[in-house]
Amino acid sequence: MVTDCLFCSIVGGEVPADIVHSDARTIGFRDINPQAPVHVLVVPRRHIVNASTVSERDGADVTAMLMAAKSVADREGIGGEDRGYRLVFNVGHDAANSVAHLHLHVMGGRPLGWPPG
Ligand code: DGP
């Protein structure tokens, strides 16, 4: 746990969040500023800064994040072949990455279009 990390504080239960998924390596909670009807952030319990700092030692956590995202999507009703969803890692300034704790955006529930705005 890293002091002054918002998502570490959510993992630790010090900051409240609408948690929709929890397992040994990850939690998933609803984004405070949703950009789609379903917008969940999946984060590793262990502090990792962002996708550009991921190394081989983080492999189990990253795999767990992808599995958690699928589980969230299925439970939220957007995982079927007739639906679909977007998974996003923002990295750095130009991507408006605002929280320095790795998080996977799981977004869906409406047609999202491509490219994103
Ligand atoms: P990013 O731009 O990829 O760093 O996304 C960070 C997201 O985190 C952004 O969509 C808003 C969300 N967020 C920021 N603060 C909070 C919070 O306190 N609670 C929750 N649930 N989400 C937050």
Image: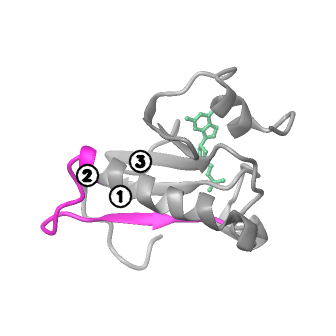
Crowding at dot 3, Cα within 10 Å, few <14 / some 14-19 / many 20+, comes out as many
> Magenta residues: mostly which secondary structure?
loop
Q: Quadrant of the N terminus?
A: top right
Q: Which residue is at a point 52% across and 49% down the rendered structure image? A: 42
Name the residue carrying label 3.
Answer: 39
Name the residue carrying label 1.
Answer: 70
Amino acid beneath label 1: Lys
Q: Are marks 3 and 2 in contact (CB under 8 Å)?
A: no
Q: Which residue is at a point 34% across and 46% down the rendered structure image? A: 38
Q: Which residue is at a point 35% across and 58% down the rendered structure image? A: 70
Q: Which residues are magenta?
A: 74-90
Q: Are marks 1 and 3 in contact (CB under 8 Å)?
A: no
Question: Gap between marks 1 and 2, in whole Å?
Answer: 6 Å
Q: Is mark 3 within 8 Å of ligand 1?
A: yes
Q: Earlier in the sequence, mark 3 or mark 2?
A: 3
Please determine whether, in this image, residue 12 is positioned above or below residue 21.
above
Q: Is residue 57 or residue 112 the one in the foreground? A: 57
Name the residue carrying label 2.
Answer: 74
* Ligand 1 lies in quarter: top right
Residue furthest out toward the left: 82
Horizontal relation, residue 27 to residue 21: left or right:
right
Q: Earlier in the sequence, mark 1 or mark 3?
A: 3
Amino acid beneath label 2: Asp
Q: Are marks 1 and 2 in contact (CB under 8 Å)?
A: yes
